[in-house]
Amino acid sequence: MVSWGMAKKHSGPGPTEARARAVAQIRRIEGQMRGIVKMIEENRYCGDVLMQISAAGESLRSVASVLLRDHLEHCVTDSLRAGDPRRARELYDELTDLFGKYAR
């Protein structure tokens, strides 16, 4: 199984359009989070704060979806095309873990 605490060497292509979009989305989410912190500090109505937290969570799920597709299109596809059966098994384990975590 995949060890989430250890960094894996990236074997895919360099930056892709999807990764650039993901970075831009994450930067917007950073702004959302700063806004949420400010709302809490200003003792704003809890319902409004919770709505903003929900929106930020949905934004993160959107980024995850973009990165998951990019991972499948590039990293996974390239590794499987290399034809290494051991690496393929590792990828199947990794994908099983990713899909399990992503589906939560």
Image (cartoon, grey):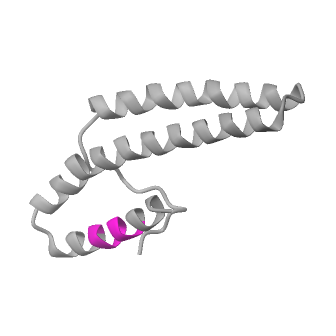
Question: Which residues fall within the magenta stretch?
Answer: 91-97
The residue closer to the viewer here, 58 or 85, is 58
Is 15 situated above or below 93? above
Residue 96 within the segment the image draws in magenta? yes
Report the residue at 58% width, 43% height from top.
57
Majority SS type along the magenta span: helix
Q: Is residue 57 visible?
A: yes
Q: Where's residue 42, x and y in %? A: 88, 25
68 to 2, vertically: above or below: above
Q: Quadrant of residue 63?
A: top left
Magenta residue check for 53: no
Q: Residue at x 61, y 29 (%)?
A: 30
Q: Nearer the viewer, residue 12 or 65?
A: 65
What percent of the width, then of the height, locates residue 84? 14, 69
Residue positioned 38% across, 64% down in the render: 99
State whether residue 15 appears in this view.
no
**Number of marks present in the image shown:** 0
Query: In the shown orientation, is residue 52 left or right of residue 62?
Result: right
Residue 1 image position (x, y, % from top left): 41, 75
Question: Residue 46: horizontal and vertical position, in percent?
Answer: 82, 38
